[in-house]
Image (spheres, rainbow, N blue to C red):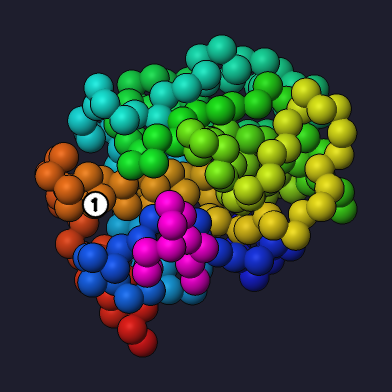
Amino acid sequence: MRPQDSRFRPHWWATGMSDLGVEARPDIATYGQYDFAHLPPVPFPMDGDLAWLAPRPEHERWPIVGNAAEAVGPLAAACARRRLPLPPAFTLFMESEALQRKVRSSTACFIDLDTAPVPVEGGGHFVRFLADQQGCLYWYLYLTEDGADHAVVCSPDYFGSEDAAVAEDLDEVSFSAESFETFLCRTWLENEIWFASTGKGAMPDVGAEYLERYRDLGSA
């Protein structure tokens, strides 16, 4: 889904990058809400197969592994009953703990996968899949009403299927990514850049180029 086609305002919730020379990412507490238009493109083809992630190393510390192993089966069944297809990259990732261990979070986010989609006021469904450790933010798939398209959205508000209610009061929901794979790629890359900058890993091969593009776009 393109940001201009979304009902939600586009923003990127993340940590600051001012110490890396990215003016568009000043430090704002743990998370800042940054200009989506300044984001550089992700540096890999988004083909739905996560080929860019497969060769990356697994990590023992700070991986986002959570409850996917227990929740992905019930979620897939609940979506099938509603004829809501899940994005292939989403299913592939949630079914593989090995892939999940390749993605680290500097803020201790973890997979918090819901077991059913939540109807959204005005149409569509949310599927929660990622949570900040302290409950500051939650990330969701947004599936259109007919299931033909999706995006990733973010909100400080919690929406869960256990409430058996329609998701309302959507003013704080932000469009975060055109697809799950794009969100995952940017999340992986920005976190690996952070870990490298703090001496906890090597800079990804595409990290320097991403930062340079971000500096250029953010200062334009």
Please name the residue shown 29% across and 68% down the image: 18
Q: Nearer the viewer, residue 105 or 142?
A: 105
Secondary structure at numbered mark 1: helix
Looking at the picture, how far across and down is residue 178, in whole percent?
55, 56
Residue position marked by numbered label 1 in the rendering: 193
| Residue 218 to residue 198: above or below | below
Q: Nearer the viewer, residue 149 or 15?
A: 15
Please name the residue shown 32% across and 76% down the image: 23
Looking at the picture, how far across and down is residue 104, in whole percent?
32, 36
Q: Amino acid type of disc 1?
A: Ile
Numbered range of the magenta stretch: 25-35
- Camera sees residue 203: yes
Q: Nearer the viewer, residue 83 or 71?
A: 71
Magenta: main secondary structure = loop
Image quarter where the C terminus lies is: bottom left
Say few, some or many: other residues with alpha carbon within 10 Å of mark 1 (under 14 / 14 to 19 / 20 or more): many
Residue 117 found in image quarter: top right
- Residue at the farthest bottom position: 220
Residue 26 falls within the magenta-colored stretch: yes
- Camera sees residue 47: no
Looking at the picture, how far across and down is residue 53, in whole percent?
31, 38
Please name the residue shown 78% across and 23% down the image: 162
Looking at the picture, how far across and down is residue 152, in whole percent?
58, 49
